[in-house]
Image (cartoon, grey):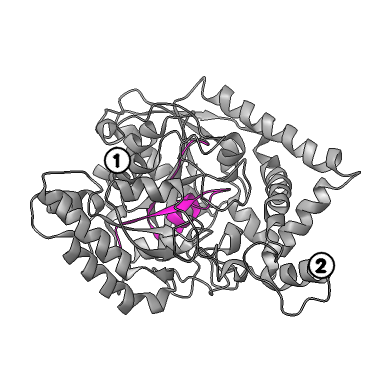
Amino acid sequence: MHQLTLAEIARGLADKKFSSEELTTVLLARIAQLDPQLNSFISLTEDLALTQAKAADARRANGENGALLGAPIAHKDLFCTQGIRTSCGSKMLDNFKAPYDATVVAKLAAAGAVTLGKTNMDEFAMGSANESSYYGAVKNPWNLEHVPGGSSGGSAAAVAARLLPAATGTDTGGSIRQPAALTNLTGLKPTYGRVSRWGMIAYASSLDQGGPLARTAEDCAILLQGMAGFDPNDSTSIDEPVPDYSASLNGSLQGLRIGVPKEYFSAGLDPRIADLVMASVEELKKLGAVIKEISLPNMQHAIPAYYVIAPAEASSNLSRFDGVRFGYRCEDPKNLEDLYKRSRGEGFGTEVQRRIMVGAYALSAGYYDAYYLKAQKIRRLIKNDFMAAFNEVDIILGPTTPNPAWKLGAKNSDPVAAYLEDVYTITANLAGLPGLSMPAGFVDGLPVGVQLLAPYFQEGRLLNVAHQYQLNTDWHTRTPTGF
């Protein structure tokens, strides 16, 4: 059962080959057995899962049918779940039980999805390796000595190890697509505003976006269908009709114009990954796509712009964690200033403190114009580059990451080296565009992903291209040894 995709689970439940309760029981046992190797979960919700599974089976018995009805999933531990710890991977929120469900959690629960637990993540989603979590690093199931990527590394590792078929993640600068690439999954960051951020604990509000992680594009379409839609509780949610993503999967790629930016193939890209990217281009050409070289001239400025904007927004968002209202509070504070300083100093980890300091500096008097304002101007130039490119092509294709997964701890002493792993993904967040990573091969036994980018609200097009590619390749079907 654990090898089944979401789509196969939906068919199996509809055909009464097994019940949601049976499937949930099998997967909970599998998590208990195998997750100690991976550390992909922060909290397991066995009682809730079995209650939801029984309810889903009852709904099916009454004639209801739906792709997510009875399907087991997990949520990244920054989606608020009522009455369940929502930690954000931080000591600061280790004792926080959310008083309400995030919109994404509520929508998927209403569709009948079964929540098995909350997955591990970089603290407050700050990281590219899932090593900054208060609960310890997550291991990559393809090689337990390597990172799974971050910040949605717990969700990625759990799905890659077949502990469950799909999970939610969030993407601020590549945090769905990068771990998807490093663990051989399909991961989708929707258009900014397509999925509600209400109840999703914020890192950088103008960049954060929730999305699905699964083994196939077909499964991502199913999960995104349940997540997407307008939410009046979220002022950045966009009131745009949600198409049937599964219905567009089988469209022909004949004549599809795919742009390959020349800037992607610089000295920083592992040449073996470059070869796999070009092999995927050849595969898509066989399916009728037309390839064109394009240019994104301002891509070189993306990392410095992102690492001013994101920390600036984080320093503002994380000011609410002060030891007063909720979360961690230091013991025996001498006064209010001591309460603030020690609660934040003891509650936040090193990477979070680093980004708060950088952000506060960039927003401080005398530096706002020099750093934050300039970064926002660069952000606009990057968006303009994409708009110009999409006048010529329908999809942009390139590597998801410049390197395969690195060893645990290898970049801990050099945060900038880890930041550079986001070079291909952060531009989509700065511009608010949808992006997808799909499996495209292996280097030294470690997975490699290819990234697709599309114009706003064209998630269906990304899923269509990835699905057609997956019908003609088998990279996405490979399973890590031992899982």
| Residue that lies at the very extreme toward the right in this rendered image | 366
Q: Where is residue 168 in the image (x, y as percent from the top left)?
A: 41, 53
Residue 56 versus residue 142 in the image, above or below = above
Image quadrant in which the C terminus is located: bottom left
Quadrant of residue 378 in the image? Answer: top right
User: Going 44% across and 58% down the picture, which residue do you hit?
Assistant: 81
In-image side of 160 versus 374 (left or right): left
Residue 144 versus residue 150 in the image, above or below = below
User: Going 53% across and 74% down the picture, which residue do you hit?
Assistant: 135
Front residue of this view, candidates 213 and 419: 213
Dot 2 corresponds to which residue?
A: 336
The local secondary structure at tag 2 comes to helix
Front residue of this view, candidates 459 and 292: 459
Q: Where is residue 152 in the image (x, y as percent from the top left)?
A: 49, 58
Q: Where is residue 228 in the image (x, y as percent from the top left)?
A: 40, 38
Q: Please count the marks in the image.
A: 2
Q: Residues within 10 Å of mark 2 (few under 14, many from 20)?
A: few
Dot 1 corresponds to which residue?
A: 467
Q: Distance between the residues labelled 2 and 1?
A: 56 Å
Per the rendering, the mark at residue 204 is none
Residue type, numbered disc 2: Leu
Q: Give the range drawn in magenta.
A: 163-192
Judge depth for marks 2 and 1 and give the one in front: 2
In-image side of 449 versus 113 (left or right): right
Q: Residues within 10 Å of mark 1 (few under 14, many from 20)?
A: many
Front residue of this view, candidates 335 and 451: 335
The local secondary structure at tag 1 comes to helix
Front residue of this view, candidates 214 and 384: 214
| Residue that lies at the very extreme toward the top in this rendered image | 391
Residue type, numbered disc 1: His
